[in-house]
Amino acid sequence: MPDLTPKKPIIIAVDGPAASGKGTLARRIAAHFNYAFLDTGSLYRALAYDVLRRGEAPADASASLRAAKKLNMAMLDDPDILAALRTDAVGTAASVVAAQPETRGAILQIQRDIADTPPDGKAGAVLDGRDIGTNVCPNAAHKIFVTARAEIRAKRRWQELRQHNPQVSLEDVLADLNARDQRDSARATAPMRAARDAHLLDTSDLSIEEAFEAALALVSH
Ligand code: C5P
C-alpha cells in the first residue's frame, strides 16, 4: 500500500545575533534544497517601519500591536520597502517592538503557518531569526545558531551601511549592535538564545563560501 499521509515539511531554523551572517546563510541553504525562505526579522522590521511612519513610538505596545494585526506580507515583496527596512534605525526600533509579548504573539502564527505549509508546495522551509529553534519551530529538523565576534559583525554591518551613508562610524555601528543584542537577549519573551539542540556555527573567521559549506555539513547528516 502506498503511504498517502502528507509528508511534514523539513524545517531548518537559523538563529543568531545581528550581522552574524545568518540571513545570507539561510537564504543559500533554502536555495540549495529548493525550500521556502522566511526572514522573520523583516516581519518585526515591517511593524517598526509602520509605527515610525505613523509618527508613533516603537515603545508604545498598542501601536505595534495595531501594526501587527494589519501586517501586509505583500509589502515584503516590494524592493523599495525592503531597502527601507534594512536601515539601522528600523533595526533598532524593530528590537524595541520585538520585546512586546502581545506583538510577538500576533505574528507567531504567520511564521508557523509558513513553516507548516511552505509556499509553492515546497518540501521544506528555512526560517531565520532569534527564536526559531527555541520558540517558533522547536521541532525543527535542524537548528543552527550562527555567531561571530561583535567587532567582526560590526565591521560587516559598517561596510554595508557605508555604501549609502559614508559618514557612519564603526564605533556607532558597534554600539548600536551591542545595544540591540543586549535588548534581544535580555527580554522576557522569547529572548535570543541557542536552542539546546542547536549546532553553533562561528563565522568570525570564515568566508561566506566556507560558512555555507560548514552549514551544509551541519544539516546534511
Ligand atoms: O534579523 P534582523 O536584524 O532583521 O531583526 C530585527 C530585529 O527583530 C531583531 O533585532 C530582533 O529584535 C527582532 N527579531 C526577533 N525575533 C526574530 C527575528 C527578529 O525578535 N525571530
Image (tube, rainbow, N blue to C red):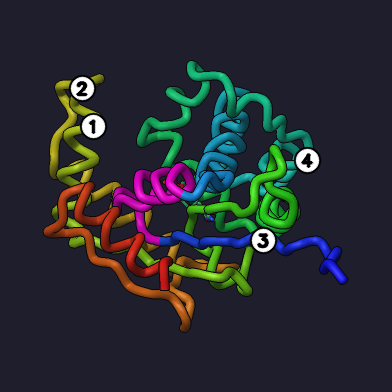
- Residue 40 vertical position relative to residue 71 in the rendered view, above or below: below
- Residue 150, given in percent of the width and then of the height, sits at 20, 58
Mark 1: is the Cβ under 8 angstroms from ligand 1?
Answer: no
Label 1 vs 4, first from the N-terminus: 4
Q: What residue is disc 4 on?
A: 69
Residue picked out by circle 3: 101
Residue placed under numbered mark 2 in the picture: 163
Residue that label 1 marks: 160
- Residue at coordinates 25% horizontally, 19% vertically from top-left? 164
Above or below 186: residue 168: above
Span shown in magenta? 16-32
Residue 51's spot in the image, x, y percent? 61, 32
- What's the CA distance linking mark 4 and mark 2? 34 Å
Q: Is mark 4 within 8 Å of ligand 1?
A: no
The single residue placed furthest to the front in the displayed view is 1
Residue depicted at x 22% and y 59%: 203
Please say if the residues under marks 1 and 3 sit with CB atoms less than 8 Å apart: no
- What residue is drawn where x is 71% and y is 35%? 71
Check whether the beta carbons of the residues at disc 1 and disc 2 lie within 8 A of each other. Answer: yes
SS label for mark 3: helix
Query: Disc 3 and disc 4: Cα gap in Å?
Result: 14 Å
